Image (cartoon, rainbow, N blue to C red):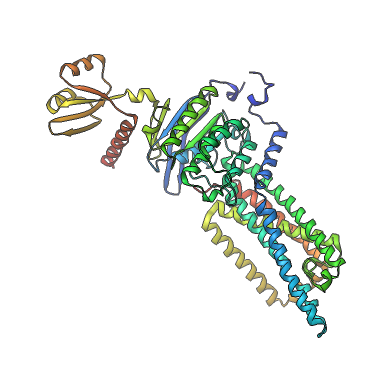
């Protein structure tokens, strides 16, 4: 029994992975694993290394150093691995002479689990113009084409790179709804890469935050959310309460202050309530923005 | 989970892999216009223009000696299609290759499938052009003494020799175009500059060699003795070189972002 046939073995195992382009290091000594049948968020700012990382995992780019295992094997020129992977690229180019229908005519040849009925339904819901030349469709429709391919392929490992660029609110909601519905019926490993974190925050079970080519956070989404809390109240009371604590973020207007600190114990929560302070949850996006900012400052101070 | 279920094991059977290579051929033919309809239409248009010219010449023959129509055997009208196929091959690499990687095709599967496509299309066009050449011959140049598919470069050794010449030429233009495009995919602009510079140096070097050794006559004799089909046979060597080079270069190529 190889790792690949073991249903609980990691789908992806990355060890000390580095990718340099000339003097620029896009991915810098990254290690992590992806477990089967979960939805991962690969989050980070533009240029943080998200796309490069996914290109490495799908064997489109070659690593400079480090190991990659997908379904227990190297993905490099490995048809057995790659046929179980679908990578919907943000900047996916299609042959110039193609029409939209050609994408859906050819995709089933390459994905074993392709569900034609599901694809048909998604095409209707996204109102894709099947006969239109691919060069003439809008940015949002281009994204929708990728979303349909990614969902209908039902690949055991599916990557969506910034899947909703240009999609309107209705289309985005369709994407999230169909993803969750289909995921419930056909569990698989999904990696959603995005810099709009709050949009997808409810879908994610686990987050990987990448910044400057390094993994900053590799945690359960719930753990990340509960890892910090915002204390709101009068400036003096807040200052007294957070004294001696690590302050992740500070905001204030007039006599009011709002300070984000690491998670509190139940006793501490009671103390805060006694001091007349309010506790507010921190959104995933806020947390990640704050953590990435902090490291930038630290980096500036040390350099 | 048992080992009998094919979908549950990683090892893809051989038939499955062959199937994926064939799927790459189908991918190229998803829209057949670029490879089939467009060049056929352009070829038909060129033929129409040539036919018009032959008609004019035919009228002038009544007054003249007939040398004018004889000159059409040096026609380059049909050469466009070879250059066109070179461009098709280059686009197959620059556009369809990154796209195919997105469909989780390996570089090897992509290259083998694309090469198979080149061979099939070369064969198809070689047969079509050989048939047209045979008609041209049988009808005495479409009744006007014109030459388009029986130009001297395609050989004067009969129908089958011409079929081989066409086939070899198509293969060369496909694989050369594809190989140059793989250099672009791998090394981008620097690769192109280096390649064209090297090719220019090589060609100028050959010209200089033949000129200084006063051997242009020998070059001419070589072509004359080998004949069109002999030269086409020699052409297979650079074609195979281009095909192998293309594969080695593409193996480490990455799609543009």
Residue sitting at 68 percent across and 64 percent down? B80
- Describe residue B209's horizontal placement relative to residue B224 as left or right: left
Quarter-wise, where is residue B135 in the image? bottom right
| Vertical relation: B202 (above or below) A132 | below
Viewer can see residue B71: yes
Residue A289's x, y, as percent? 31, 35
Residue A201's x, y, as percent? 39, 29
Q: How many marks?
A: 0
Using the image as rendered, state which of residue B58 and residue A286 is in the foreground.
B58
Q: Quadrant of the N terminus of chain A?
A: top right
Of all residues shown, which one is farthest toward the bottom? B63
Residue sitting at 81 percent across and 60 percent down? B130
- Describe residue B194's horizontal placement relative to residue B170 as left or right: left
Using the image as rendered, state which of residue B204 and residue A70 is in the foreground.
A70
| Vertical relation: B99 (above or below) B216 | above
Residue B117's x, y, as percent? 70, 48
Using the image as rendered, state which of residue A195 and residue B175 is in the foreground.
A195
| Vertical relation: B234 (above or below) B74 | above
Quarter-wise, where is residue B139 in the image? bottom right
Residue B127's x, y, as percent? 80, 56
- Describe residue B220's horizontal placement relative to residue B26 as left or right: right
Viewer can see residue B105: no
Quarter-wise, where is residue A227 in the image? top left
- Describe residue A65's horizontal placement relative to residue A288 as left or right: right
| Vertical relation: B212 (above or below) A189 | below
Q: Quadrant of the C terminus of chain A?
A: top left
């Amino acid at each position: 029994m190889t790792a690949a046939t073991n249903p609980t073995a990691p789908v992806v195992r990355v060890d000390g992975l580095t990718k340099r382009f000339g003097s620029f290091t896009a991915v810098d000594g990254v290690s992590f694993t992806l477990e089967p049948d979960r939805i991962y968020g690969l989050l980070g700012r533009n240029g943080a290394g998200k796309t490069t990382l996914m290109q490495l995992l799908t064997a489109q780019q070659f690593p400079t150093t480090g190991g990659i295992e997908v379904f227990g094997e190297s993905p490099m020129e490995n048809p057995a691995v790659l046929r179980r992977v679908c990578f919907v690229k943000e900047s996916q180019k299609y042959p110039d002479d193609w029409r939209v229908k050609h994408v859906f005519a050819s995709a089933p040849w390459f994905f074993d689990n392709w569900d034609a009925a599901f694809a048909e339904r998604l095409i209707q819901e996204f109102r894709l113009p099947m006969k239109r030349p691919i060069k003439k469709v809008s940015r949002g429709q281009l994204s929708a084409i990728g979303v349909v391919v990614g969902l209908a392929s039902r690949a055991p490992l599916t990557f969506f790179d910034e899947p909703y660029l240009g999609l309107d609110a209705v289309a985005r909601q369709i994407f999230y709804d169909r993803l969750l519905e289909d995921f419930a019926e056909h569990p698989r490993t999904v990696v959603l890469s995005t810099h709009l974190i709050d949009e997808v925050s409810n879908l994610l079970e686990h987050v990987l935050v990448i910044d400057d080519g390094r993994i900053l956070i590799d945690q359960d989404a719930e753990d990340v959310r509960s890892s910090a809390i915002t204390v709101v109240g009068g400036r003096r009371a807040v200052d007294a309460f957070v004294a001696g604590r690590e302050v992740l973020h500070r905001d204030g207007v007039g006599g009011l202050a709002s300070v984000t600190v690491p998670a509190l114990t139940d006793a501490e929560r009671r103390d805060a309530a006694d001091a007349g302070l309010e506790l507010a949850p921190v959104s995933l996006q806020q947390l990640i923005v704050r953590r990435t900012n902090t490291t930038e400052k630290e980096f500036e101070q040390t350099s | 989970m048992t080992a009998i279920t094919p979908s549950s094991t990683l090892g893809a059977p051989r038939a499955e892999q062959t199937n994926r290579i064939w799927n790459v051929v189908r991918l190229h033919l998803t829209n057949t216009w670029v490879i089939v309809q467009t060049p056929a239409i352009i070829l038909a248009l060129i033929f129409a223009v040539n036919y018009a010219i032959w008609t004019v010449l035919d009228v002038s023959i009544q007054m003249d000696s007939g040398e004018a129509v004889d000159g059409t055997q040096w026609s380059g009208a049909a050469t466009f299609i070879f250059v066109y196929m070179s461009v098709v091959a280059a686009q197959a690499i620059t556009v369809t290759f990154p796209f195919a990687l997105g469909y989780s095709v390996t570089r090897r599967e992509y290259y083998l499938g694309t090469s198979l496509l080149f061979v099939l299309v070369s064969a198809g066009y070689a047969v079509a052009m050989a048939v047209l050449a045979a008609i041209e011959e049988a009808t005495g140049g479409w009744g006007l003494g014109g030459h388009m598919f029986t130009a001297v470069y395609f050989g004067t050794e009969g129908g089958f020799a011409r079929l081989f010449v066409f086939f070899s030429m198509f293969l060369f233009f496909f694989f050369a175009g594809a190989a140059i495009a793989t250099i672009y995919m791998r090394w981008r602009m620097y690769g192109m500059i280096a390649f064209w510079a090297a090719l220019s140096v090589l060609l100028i070097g050959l010209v200089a060699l033949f000129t200084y050794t006063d051997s242009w006559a020998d070059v001419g004799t070589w072509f004359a003795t080998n004949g069109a089909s002999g030269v086409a046979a020699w052409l297979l060597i650079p074609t195979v070189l281009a095909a192998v080079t293309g594969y080695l270069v593409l193996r480490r190529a990455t799609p543009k972002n």
